[in-house]
């Protein structure tokens, strides 16, 4: 046991002291928070800078004067010959367009929009919205309907989405927050299992190719060496996660304050970008603090560390076996691909199937399979999962880890001392069958 502890200590301290560890630990939260703020302000600026000038040639005669200017678009009426107007705009680099409204517009419902480059999507949407409103009013007038009465109708509807608790009470539910957390956990677990699992494999390959492992194996058993490396690198991962968590909470608080100071403007820009058939999606009335209160962060953080550790130990044991069987990272590809396919499949499904139906048959079964449960269960937990399912999933994951470690250890003890011989699946099965 002392030998395993020495290996753990060596793996942990050697990696934590590296400059790359410190840079990654402190720069990753800064990068994501910076990206979060940057996307917000760049999106806002893109709406501010996308003001369009639209020259209108109204062959119908009664449509152009009904087009309304706003902060995103300005209409000007042109009496110049069509070809001259096209010549004027063809070399323009700004958002200048030419709108041609044909004489039979109200029958055909079709116009032409000419631009020097590819017409801006937001500009097309704005023009389309204007023209649809004109057509709608025209049809109302044909039917003798008072358009002012229709415009004054208040058709706003809100849904108070609530979930029924075990005690029978109904509490407010914030599904959008659960979805956001679920997808964030999916990305985090997927990347971390690959990152730290690959570190285990890379470390073993380096020691094997440099022949250092021959000296180490003379003092410790192969299983002790494998477990020491897995646990040591796993502790590095936990240390990094804890630091990321603390830094992210601190930086998110600052970023959220900056963002919400301009919440009204952000809501206006967002609503313009997702406008469809006069139905606007708005963020007004959304209380972020109340939404986060609906999430059991104690359970979420505890389960995250437990399932991360379980998934890490399971996949790291397999990565260790692969590292012992090959002489370079290039050769490892043929073995790592089958190993990581279940994890990749769950990661892809987490953005659609698991989030949309977290208590469905597929999501439930994936959360019980050891190779998929580290992602599947963490995606489901923000939506509410019975405690017995979490405990059963964790128990199966631990059992899967123990079985995987036993299998990996039998391969590792032989493969770690094999040089120059290209391993195959058939050869690895032989190593597994060798007696101690």
Image: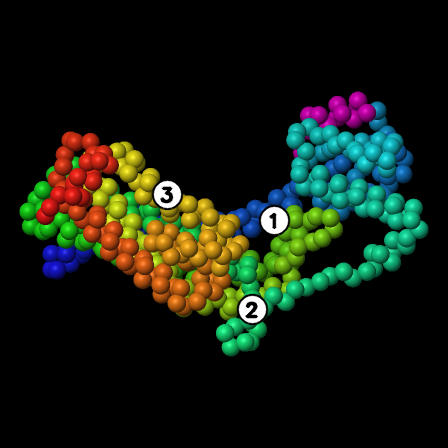
**Which residue is painted at 60% across and 58% down in the image?**
262
Is disc 1 placed on a helix, strand or loop?
A: helix
Residue 245 among magenta residues: no
Tell me: residue 320, above or below residue 369.
above
Q: Please report the residue visible at 75 percent of the width from the left and 23 percent of the height from the top.
A: 87
Q: Which residue is mark 2?
A: 163
Front residue (pair 426, 253): 426
Q: Main secondary structure of the magenta part?
A: helix
130 lies above or below 420: below
Task: State the residue in front, 432 or 328.
Answer: 432
| Residue at 74 percent of width and 37 percent of height | 53
User: On the picture, is 266 further left or further right than 296?
Assistant: right
Disc 3 marks which residue?
341
* Residue 275 in picture, x, y percent from top left: 69, 49
Q: Which mark sits nearer the N-terminus, 3 or 2?
A: 2
Query: Do we see residue 416 in this rendering?
Result: no
Q: CA distance from mark 3 to mark 2?
A: 35 Å
Q: To which residue does mark 1 refer?
A: 44
Q: Position of residue 414 (x, y in %)?
A: 14, 42
Q: Position of residue 320 (x, y in %)?
A: 23, 46
Q: Earlier in the sequence, mark 1 or mark 3?
A: 1
- Give SS at disc 3: helix
Residue range of the region highlighted in magenta in the rendering: 82-94
């Amino acid at each position: 046991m002392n030998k395993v502890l020495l290996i753990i200590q060596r793996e942990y301290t050697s990696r934590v002291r590296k400059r790359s560890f410190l840079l990654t630990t402190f720069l990753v939260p800064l990068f994501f928070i910076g990206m979060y703020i940057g996307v917000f302000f760049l999106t806002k600026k893109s709406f501010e800078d996308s003001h369009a000038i639209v020259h209108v040639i109204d062959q119908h005669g009664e449509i152009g004067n009904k087009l309304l200017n706003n902060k995103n678009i300005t209409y000007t009426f042109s009496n110049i010959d069509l070809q001259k107007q096209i010549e004027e705009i063809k070399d323009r680099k700004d958002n200048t367009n030419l709108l041609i409204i044909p004489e039979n517009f109200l029958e055909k419902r079709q116009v032409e929009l000419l631009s020097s480059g590819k017409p801006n999507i937001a500009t097309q949407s704005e023009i389309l919205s204007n023209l649809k409103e004109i057509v709608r009013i025209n049809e109302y007038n044909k039917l003798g309907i008072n358009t002012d009465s229709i415009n004054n109708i208040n058709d706003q509807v809100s849904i108070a989405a609530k979930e029924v608790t075990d005690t029978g009470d109904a509490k407010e539910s914030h599904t959008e927050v659960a979805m956001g957390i679920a997808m964030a956990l999916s990305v985090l677990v997927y990347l971390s299992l690959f990152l730290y699992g690959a570190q285990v494999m890379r470390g073993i390959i380096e020691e094997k190719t440099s022949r250092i492992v021959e000296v180490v194996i003379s003092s410790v058993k192969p299983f002790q060496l494998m477990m020491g490396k897995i646990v040591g690198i796993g502790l590095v991962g936990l240390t990094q996660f804890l630091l990321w968590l603390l830094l992210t909470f601190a930086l998110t608080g600052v970023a959220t304050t900056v963002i919400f100071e301009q919440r009204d403007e952000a809501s206006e820009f967002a609503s313009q970008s997702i406008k469809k058939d006069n139905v606007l999606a708005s963020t007004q009335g959304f209380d972020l603090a109340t939404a986060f209160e609906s999430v059991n962060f104690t359970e979420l953080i505890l389960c995250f560390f437990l399932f991360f550790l379980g998934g890490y130990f399971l996949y790291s044991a397999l990565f260790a076996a692969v590292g012992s069987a090959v002489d370079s990272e290039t050769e490892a590809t043929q073995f790592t691909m089958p190993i990581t396919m279940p994890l990749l499949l769950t990661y892809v499904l987490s953005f659609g199937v698991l989030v949309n139906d977290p208590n469905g048959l597929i999501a439930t079964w994936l959360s019980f399979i050891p190779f998929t449960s580290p992602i599947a269960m963490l995606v489901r937990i923000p939506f509410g999962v019975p405690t017995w399912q979490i405990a059963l999933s964790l128990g199966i994951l631990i059992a899967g880890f123990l079985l995987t470690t036993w299998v990996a250890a039998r391969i590792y003890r032989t493969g770690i001392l094999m040089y120059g011989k290209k391993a195959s699946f058939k050869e690895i099965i032989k190593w597994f069958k060798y007696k101690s």
